Amino acid sequence: MRLLSACLRLFPALLLLALPGIANAAEVDGASLGLLWGLPFVGILLSIALMPIIAGDIWHHHFGKITAGWTLLFLVPFVLTFGWHASLGLGVHVLFGEYLPFIILLLALFTISGGILVEGNLHGSAGLNTALLALGTLLASVMGTTGAAMLLIRPLLRANDNRRHNAHVVVFFIFLVANVGGGLTPLGDPPLFLGFLKGVDFFWTLQHMALPVAALALPLLALFYLIDRHFYSRENELAPIDPTPDTPLRLRGQFNFLLLAGVVGAVLLSGLWKPGIGFDLLGTRVELQSLVRDGALVILALLSLWMTPRAVREGNEFGWGPIIEVAKLFAGIFLTIAPVIAILRAGSDGQLAAVVASVTDSTGQPLDAMYFWMSGTLSSFLDNAPTYLVFFNLASGDAQVMMERLPQTLLAISMGSVFMGAMTYVGNAPNFMVKAIAEQRGVRMPSFFGYMLWSCAVLLPLLLVLQLVLL
């Protein structure tokens, strides 16, 4: 019943997608589109970035209406300009080709990870904290950054709730578990899964991102250990009494790990098994392997709901709010990003020719370092998933071309989108969720700009070294 209720709440967003009104860059001449077509997309992203800061209550209660307003600002003019027939076909393209696979994977990871509960408490020493961060970094590429963050943030907070200096623990948790750790597989972070849907091979991501993830995660863990050991040494007998005394750890809902393995298997299957069977739906080819994958993910999520005791989900404070918010926001994002992609694909003939020129040299070859910093900078202040799509399409839009001819460019976009989502609270969805949970537990988290001081001092130099060495 809870899943049915959630689906009913998601229905308006899905209905919105089913209506005519999506621009497909392949069928709309981007050279003929003005920059005003991109205003709704920019409006949604700026709303996501700024409204939680300047008008948090309004955004929390009306984010769906705000997103729908920006989306209608795109839909109505587009239908009037390009007609209903083309709009309906293109709407189906985004619904089945991008949105549904994207949100179904997130729903499965969110539901299954919410059925795993870590009970008990350990003592938050520098060694234990570093071990927990390392574990979360590894789990993030299997469970997704959201799943790993939601699984481990509460045990980490309990372990450190008697320490006066603990905000830095959460800051590094956001760096590593909510962002960097998700870089190994398409399961880990939404940008990489969008690349997978576009045709980037699962094992290409694993092979090429392994070194960058390790090269960034290991120094971050070492630096965290030194910082945490320093703060831990300053704790004394005046520290508050531990509200959650040390008790042995106990893991509940372990069978959900088997379901997570099923998620990995379903995604791998869709990438490896290509029987060549599919059907055409208003110009969009829907492949059998994609239908099998999405159906399997839904079944795995339902199994998790059925088999997980209610007490386990209550212990995790599980609720549908976060995934419903993501579903509504990305319904608008996937709709409104289409004209931006069309303009970018027009290259020097489009209204974003200056952006194209900034990431290419005089011969038209991509400047990988510029792709890294531009995709990363936008991912820092906007959501990293649509940012990845923008630069993926700017570079080529063809996964085979990217993997075979432009592997360093694809690597640069992947690194920038995943890693620099950690630069601000709004760069990646789990960042704000972790911050909110920590503040609910009494941790005095840095402000928006205070967090940026941490990321600029710690992350930025490491990212610069990474770019110089790998790109």
Image (tube, grey):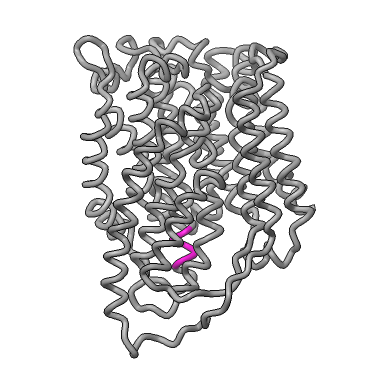
Picture coordinates of residue 312 (x, y %)? 69, 64
Picture coordinates of residue 166 (x, y %)? 36, 71
Q: Judge whether residue 150 can be spotted in this image.
A: yes
Residue 437 forms part of the magenta stretch: yes
* Front in this rendered view, residue 439 or 297: 297
**Would you say the magenta stretch is mainly helix, strand or loop?**
helix
Q: How many marks?
A: 0
What are the residue bounds of the magenta stretch? Answer: 434-438
* Front in this rendered view, residue 443 or 195: 195
Q: Which residue lies furthest to the bottom in this view?
A: 237
The residue that appears at 32% across and 17% down in the rendered structure is 351
- Considering only vertical position in the picture, is 329 above or below 458? above
- Considering only vertical position in the picture, is 389 above or below 86? below
- Considering only vertical position in the picture, is 159 above or below 429? below
Picture coordinates of residue 330 (x, y %)? 54, 37
Instruction: Give left or right: position of 100 versus 150.
Output: right
Instruction: Give left or right: position of 384 versus 87.
Output: left
Residue 7 in which image quadrant: top right
Q: Quadrant of the C terminus?
A: top left
Residue 249 forms part of the magenta stretch: no
* Front in this rendered view, residue 290 or 141: 141
Picture coordinates of residue 411 (x, y %)? 36, 29
The residue that appears at 40% across and 86% down in the rendered structure is 240
Q: Judge whether residue 381 can be spotted in this image.
A: no
